[in-house]
Amino acid sequence: MRIAIIGQQDFGKAALEAFLARGDEVVGVFCAPEKGRPDPLRLAGEAAGVPTHQFPKLSDPEALEALRGAKADIGVMAYVTQFAPGDFCALPKFGTIQFHPSLLPLHRGASSMSWSIILGRAETGFSIFRPTDGLDEGPVLLTRAVPIEPEDTLGSVYFGKIFPMGVAGLIEAADMVLAGKAPAIAQYEPAAGYEGIIRDAESRIHWASHVDQTFNLIRGLNPAPGAWTTHDGKKLFLFESGKRIARTFAEVKGKKIGQVAARSGTGLVIHGQGGFIEVHRVRWEGGKKIPAIEAGMEVGTLLGG
């Protein structure tokens, strides 16, 4: 099988290595231009001697010509942040397949895994689908579900569950396509949902929200980018955490919403609506992650203004 890998970062690298490991011929790697650290997919492609490209846009004539010249049997989109137009995706002999980390048509969009956790879902997963010019809207070839446990974070769901299964799913779907056995199931639009990228506004903690919501927000953004609050005008990002529901009025009497109610081991216990968040790891804006107990906040400190 002649494969073109379109993607980036560790997931793209893992897909590349998985196809190579089983003897497939990877005839091209297409990844986005780097804005900071070297892209692991680019480095892996170059190390394997695969023609590796970084085009500003996959719609550029040079990108189309590079993929056309690769004579790929199938294009495999593994963690793609660039828009891939239909004429690009149609160039491989059997077209292109794409990985998306949600059970489509739920949670279309770039922050799908985070939204699954933030909204308190008990299940998520991934889909392999045929890309179209609509974002995550193409017919589905394969889905796999995974549970979201009550203490799961974005990191544990992605790296512990979806990442390894997703790489295997791309191989399975590619084999199905070349064998002529891949379904193309139209997404059920009445069940569809799209959410935008999680930015500052969405990741800010509002302590007056119920602790169930606050806890889901923190774990849905852990390990990155982190849910945040403020103290003395500075952003404080919260990561490893737990929650405790208040059972009686006596537990919260005299405590203000957003107030550090106690120090516990390596953590700080923060009063929110309906209970408490116990946070164990934090990061001041511009700094590194540290134990919450080292953040310099005493009992009575009020967070979030």
Image (tube, grey):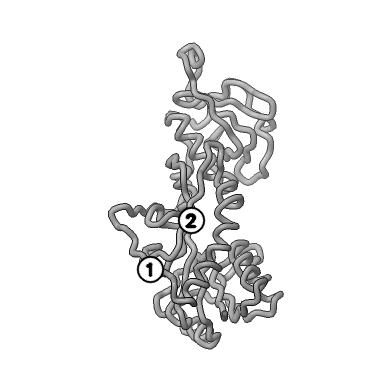
Quadrant into which the N terminus falls: bottom right
Give the numbered dot on residue 157. Answer: none
Q: Is residue 299 above or below residue 206?
A: above
Say whether residue 282 is left or right of residue 256.
right
* Local SS, label 2: strand
Q: Position of residue 262 (x, y in %)?
A: 61, 21
Of labels 2 and 1, earlier in sequence is: 2
Q: Residue at 57% of width from left, 21% of height from top?
A: 261
Q: How many marks?
A: 2
* Type of the residue with mark 2: Arg
Along the viewing direction, whichever of 235 and 120 lies nearer the viewer: 120
- Indicate the amino acid at tag 1: Ala
In this rendering, does residue 117 appear at all? Answer: yes
Residue underneath mark 2: 144
Q: Which residue is mark 1?
A: 184
Q: Residues within 10 Å of mark 2 (few under 14, many from 20)?
A: some
The answer to whether the residues at label 2 and label 1 have Cβ atoms under 8 Å apart is no
Q: Quadrant of residue 295?
A: top right
Q: Which residue, as the protein is rendered here, is positioned at the far bottom?
A: 69
- Work out whether residue 39 can be spotted: no
- Residue at the (51%, 69%) spot, across then down: 77
Give the Cα separation between the discs numbered 2 and 1.
15 Å
Closer-to-camera residue (301/68)? 68
| Residue 296, x across and y down, in percent | 66, 30
Secondary element type, mark 1: loop
Rendered position, 305 above or below 78: above
- Taking the spot 71% from the left edge, 75% from the top edge, the residue there is 47
In the rendered image of this protein, does residue 74 appear above or below residue 127? Answer: below
> Where residue 19 appears, x then y in whole percent?
62, 72
Taking the spot 56% from the left edge, 77% from the top edge, the residue there is: 3
* Front residue of this view, candidates 149 and 154: 149
Alpha-carbon neighbours of circle 1 within 10 Å: few (<14), some, or many (≥20)? Answer: some
